[in-house]
Image (spheres, rainbow, N blue to C red):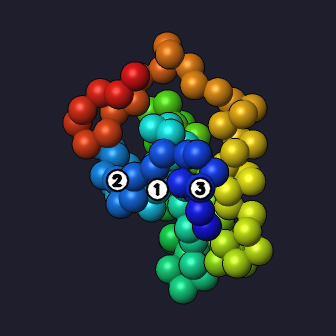
Amino acid sequence: MDLEAAGLSFEDGVEIEGVGEVDLVVEGWVVVELDGYTYHCDEYQFGLDRWRDRRLVARGFLPLRFTRKDVYTHQVVPDVLKAVECWGVSKSVTKVVAGAERA
């Protein structure tokens, strides 16, 4: 997975207020979560992941979830690029990351 080579800026291990830590934040607004089966296989975790996605959307982020297979088959970068292309950046949306506002 080479987001940097694709010209995308990202941060890993970002703490988002009201959500917790996410795997990656790309371009300041696309949240990439890499879900391994070990930690995301039971009903509780499945529900928690959906709750986190809703909290992210409410804060102006676009959550994208990928499996290990997606990483190995090189689906992450093309899908993130497509999301950035299709959704663009809305200047009217304010994002809150670890208590600091981002526009």
Q: Is residue 29 above or below residue 41?
A: above
Q: Residue 31: x, y in percent?
A: 52, 49
Q: Residue 49: x, y in percent?
A: 53, 60
| Of callouts 2 and 3, the N-terminal one | 3
Label 1, label 2: how many angstroms apart (C-alpha)? 7 Å
Q: Is residue 69 above or below residue 77?
A: below
Which callout, 2 or 3, points to the residue nearer the camera? 3
Residue type at numbered disc 1: Leu
Question: What is the quadrant of the N terminus in the image?
Answer: bottom right
Residue type at numbered disc 2: Val
Tell me: 82 left or right of 88: right
Q: Residue 68: x, y in percent?
A: 65, 78
Q: Residues within 10 Å of mark 1 (few under 14, many from 20)?
A: many
Residue hosting label 1: 24
Q: Which mark is residue 40?
A: none
Tell me: 27 left or right of 102: right
**Res. 74 visible in picture:** yes
Label 2, label 3: how many angstroms apart (C-alpha)? 21 Å
Residue occupying image coordinates x 73% and y 52%: 79
**Res. 22 visible in picture:** no
Residue occupying image coordinates x 72% and y 34%: 85
Residue occupying image coordinates x 60% and y 82%: 37
51 vs 67, nearest the viewer: 67
Question: What is the quadrant of the C terminus in the image?
Answer: top left
50 vs 93, nearest the viewer: 93
Q: Which mark is residue 14?
A: 2
| Of callouts 3 and 1, the N-terminal one | 3
